[in-house]
């Protein structure tokens, strides 16, 4: 008779691998099962366009990963993870050739916003400077799970974090600062008038000042590979090319931990309609480019930024998000772009570049946004199309095929509108647990939500560990 495992993890994305590592570090026998032929989930790197051009099909830049409490507690550099930083974390260009920037330096960021808003920006971030370790630990978790480590900073940040981005931007006079913050909030793909979107923007800004917005050398695959290397060193095992359709497909275990969408987990674990009302959010339309040279941005700061946001006004960004939320075709999209070869030359042949861009579209949208995206790019980088050697496009249906967790093309694995950023996947004291005492969820559908930071897996593993100890 086969020995019963302590835990089986379904899905080898960053959260699944983090959960597996956390359990293996506690001496448990752990195995991971992944349906794809390779590991990584939303943190993969592939040659999507031409030979020698290495692209990240989903996540590319990791402001919450570089100093994630989960990742920094692991010796991932020993297993090949190396963070590389651009000269500027992020630039937000405008039609007149200028740009607001998100710099490692608060002063440089404030100065780019204009004299009327520089002081307001400094006052906004000053209470949180130098406090990232406790701030991240206190907010990248289930908010009702224990007391905060730094109650004063927690309360001060919480008062701002609960605000909608629409309210937070009223602190500023000019369009540059308002657009910069709207762009940061738009990473959540939620209405700018929604609860918590201001906090999302502020957290990304503080992350830039505290740890930058870096990329892993060689691609996001390096994160998954480092986690896998550490897991194997701890005695864990990973199986790829193994699609799990029901719990009986897996070996006997005391706990089953799912790095999947809630609806997939319910189907596999036989939990019926437990998550039948779970809401997925808008999707994205993503294009990966192989380029003959760097993007010819008109704004000089954009030429040295790892990430570039394109949406010159608060109103334009709000309108683009609104179209995706209300099921309308994109016309003037807000774009989030990444140019990793500015700081990582391992990803393209000599003199060539990779470039990554997405705009927001309705969930399940089947149209082609290539034209509207490239038209928007040409507004701020005239001649961009002349540099395109090849492109790989992926709308919501293609994204869902690439990663089954992205239901309808939702890369956040669930809506973050209203209170759903905090209460996910459902209101529960332990959101990682389910109606089945041996089944747990660890994907980005659980707190603290989207991003490659491993914190959902970290906290889910703690919940599994507490449950197993009680059983013992």
Image (spheres, rainbow, N blue to C red):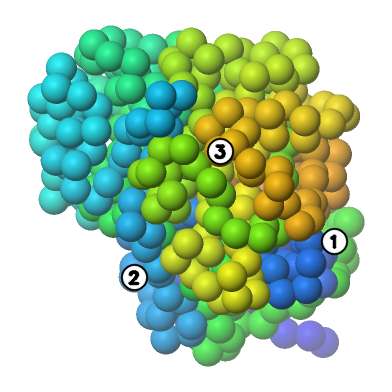
Considering only vertical position in the picture, is 453 above or below 385?
below
Q: Is residue 434 visible?
A: no
Marks 1, 2: nearer the viewer? 2
Coordinates of residue 375 in the picture (x, y in percent): 68, 29
Q: Nearer the viewer, residue 236 or 470?
A: 236
- Residue that label 3 marks: 381
Residue drawn at x 54%, y 22% as measured from the top left: 190
Residue 421: give its label.
none
Q: Is residue 144 left or right of residue 278?
A: left
Q: Secondary structure at mark 2?
A: loop
Residue drawn at x 79%, y 56% as measured from the top left: 390
- Residue that label 1 marks: 244
Measured in 3D between alpha carbons, the distance from the residue under mark 1 to the one under mark 2, in whole angstroms, is 30 Å
Considering only vertical position in the picture, is 56 above or below 157?
below
Coordinates of residue 13 in the picture (x, y in percent): 64, 61
Please identify the quarter of the rendering in which residue 14 is found.
bottom right
- Residue that label 2 marks: 73
């Amino acid at each position: 008779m086969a020995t019963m495992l302590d835990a089986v993890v379904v899905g080898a994305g960053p959260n699944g691998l983090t959960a597996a590592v956390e359990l293996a570090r506690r001496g448990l026998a752990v195995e991971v099962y992944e349906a794809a032929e390779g590991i990584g989930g939303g943190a993969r790197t592939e040659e999507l366009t031409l030979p020698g051009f290495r692209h990240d099909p989903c996540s590319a830049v990791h402001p919450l990963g570089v100093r994630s409490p989960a990742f920094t507690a692991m010796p991932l550099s020993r297993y090949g993870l190396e963070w590389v930083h651009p000269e500027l974390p992020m630039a937000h260009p405008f039609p007149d050739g200028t740009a607001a920037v998100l710099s490692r330096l608060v002063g440089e960021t404030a100065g780019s916003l204009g004299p009327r808003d520089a002081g307001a920006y400094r006052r906004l971030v000053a209470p949180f400077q130098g406090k990232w370790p406790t701030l991240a630990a206190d907010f990248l978790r289930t908010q009702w799970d224990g007391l905060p480590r730094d109650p004063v900073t927690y309360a001060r940040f919480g008062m701002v974090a609960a605000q909608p981005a629409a309210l937070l931007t009223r602190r500023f006079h000019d369009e540059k600062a308002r657009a910069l913050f709207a762009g940061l909030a738009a990473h959540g793909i939620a209405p700018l008038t929604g609860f918590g979107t201001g906090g999302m923007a502020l957290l990304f800004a503080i992350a830039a000042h505290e740890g930058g917005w870096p990329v892993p050398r060689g691609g996001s695959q390096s994160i998954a590979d480092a986690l896998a290397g550490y897991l194997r060193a701890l005695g864990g095992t990973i199986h790829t090319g193994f699609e799990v359709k029901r719990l009986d497909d897996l070996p006997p275990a005391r706990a089953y931990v799912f790095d999947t969408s809630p609806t997939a987990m319910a189907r596999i674990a036989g939990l019926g309609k437990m998550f039948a009302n779970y809401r997925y959010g808008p999707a994205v339309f993503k294009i990966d480019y192989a380029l003959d040279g760097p993007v010819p941005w008109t704004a000089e700061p954009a030429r040295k930024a790892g990430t570039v946001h394109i949406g010159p006004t608060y109103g334009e960004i709000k309108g683009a998000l609104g179209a995706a939320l209300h099921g309308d075709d994109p016309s003037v999209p807000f774009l989030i772009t990444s140019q990793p070869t500015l700081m990582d030359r391992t990803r393209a042949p000599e003199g060539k570049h990779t470039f990554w861009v997405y705009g927001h579209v309705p969930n399940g949208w089947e149209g082609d946004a290539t034209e509207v995206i490239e038209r928007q790019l040409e507004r701020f980088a005239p001649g961009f199309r002349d540099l395109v050697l090849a492109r790989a496009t992926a709308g919501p249906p293609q994204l869902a095929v690439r990663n089954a967790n992205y239901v309808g093309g939702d890369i956040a694995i669930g809506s973050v509108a209203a209170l759903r950023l905090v209460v996910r996947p459902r209101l529960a004291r332990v959101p990682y647990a389910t109606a089945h005492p041996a089944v747990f969820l660890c994907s980005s559908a659980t707190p603290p939500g989207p991003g490659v930071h491993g914190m959902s897996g970290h906290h889910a593993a703690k919940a599994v560990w507490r449950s197993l100890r009680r059983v013992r």
